Image (spheres, rainbow, N blue to C red):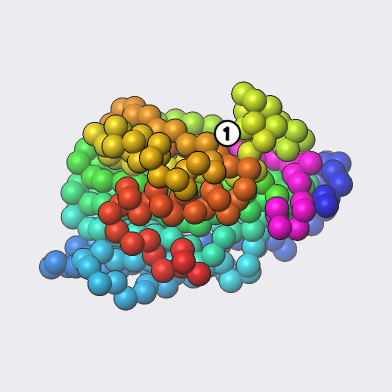
Amino acid sequence: MYAPALPLPVDPLLPAYVRASGGVRLRFGAVGARTMRLEVAESGGYRARFPTSHDGRCEAVLINTAGGMAGGDRARTQIALDPGAQAVVTTQAAEKIYRSQGSDTHVDTEIAVAPGAELAWLPQETILFSGARLARSLSVDLAADSRFIACETLYFGRAAMGETLLHGSVRDRWRIRRAGRLVFAEDLRLEGAIEETLRRKAVGQGARAISTVLATEPGRLDEIRAFLAEETVFSEVEAAAGAHEGFLLIRLLGGDAQALRRALVMLLGHLTRRALPRTWSI
């Protein structure tokens, strides 16, 4: 099952004013022994909800009430943590990127973590429909002693529907700065016949799902490598870990999206030493 490629029009098929645009802006601060939300701004069809937490952290769940994004849609998430704050931000469900008629779907995330603060940015997976065009960016500014973990996952096509990504576009840009200095920069770009590209041994070797985890835990590299080698759940995926510029970087590749998700849940629980947000178990 697939959507045939569409020629890219010179002008968008739909004007910009009928496309969805919105986002969420959050600021967290330490109030006594707990972290509280200090600012919440919502626009378009995007909302934030705050489940009750049983420790000092504040948990936020981002919701796209539209249920997905189409070509030309834009979403912007801004998260700021004041000194000493602790928060985890996730999403209610997987984000679906629908087939585009020519325009890119833009998803931008901007994060600032102040001294002594700790943030876990753990959105659930992004599912690319055949013909989708995604332009995504993650920009993070960290203080010298702040702690941070991020996880982003892409599913290429809806495996349960027998769909393959014969045509589409993915551009994923990461920029991480520590004390104002750029310490991690990465750009992923896949264009055209994405499934065919992912079948190449030097690219994905048939992967249909990929996940990147970045954490300020470089001293745990040997422990994480042993964990990936010993736990049976990782036998269903390709997994590797490395350290660079004070960060631990972990990659997961899988031909089966659900197998990769099982491995990712195990990995994130081990890394954070805490239960994942409840939306991850739904």
Between residue 250 and residue 71, name the one nearer to us.
250
Left or right of 203, for residue 268? left
Image location of residue 16, percent across then percent down: 71, 56
Up/down of 106 relative to 37, above or below: above
Quadrant in the rendering for residue 201? top right
Q: Is residue 272 above or below residue 240?
A: below
Which residues make up the magenta segment?
158-180
Q: Quadrant of residue 28?
A: bottom left
Q: Residues within 10 Å of mark 1 (few under 14, many from 20)?
A: few
User: Would you say 265 lies left or right of 161 here?
Assistant: left
Side of 38 where 184 appears, left or right: right
Q: Is residue 112 left or right of residue 189?
A: left
At horizontal 22% and vertical 68% (from top left) the residue drawn is 55
For mark 1, give the secondary structure: strand
Percent coordinates x, y for residue 211 in the rendering: 51, 43
Identified at 63% across, 53% down, the residue is 127
Q: Is residue 119 magenta?
A: no
Q: Residue furthest left?
A: 32
Q: Is residue 116 visible?
A: yes
Residue beneath label 1, please?
Answer: 188
In the image, residue 184 sits, relative to residue 254, either above or below, namely: above
User: At 62% across and 28% down in the image, what residue appears?
Assistant: 203
Q: Nearer the viewer, residue 16 or 141?
A: 141
Total marks drawn? 1
Residue 20 percent across, percent down from the top left: 65, 62
Residue at the far top in the pictured view: 202
Whether residue 76 can be seen here: no
Residue 134 locus on image (x, y percent): 64, 46
Q: Residue at x 51, y 61 (%)?
A: 23
Query: Which amino acid lies under the numbered mark 1 shown in the image of this protein?
Result: Leu
Q: Is residue 169 magenta?
A: yes
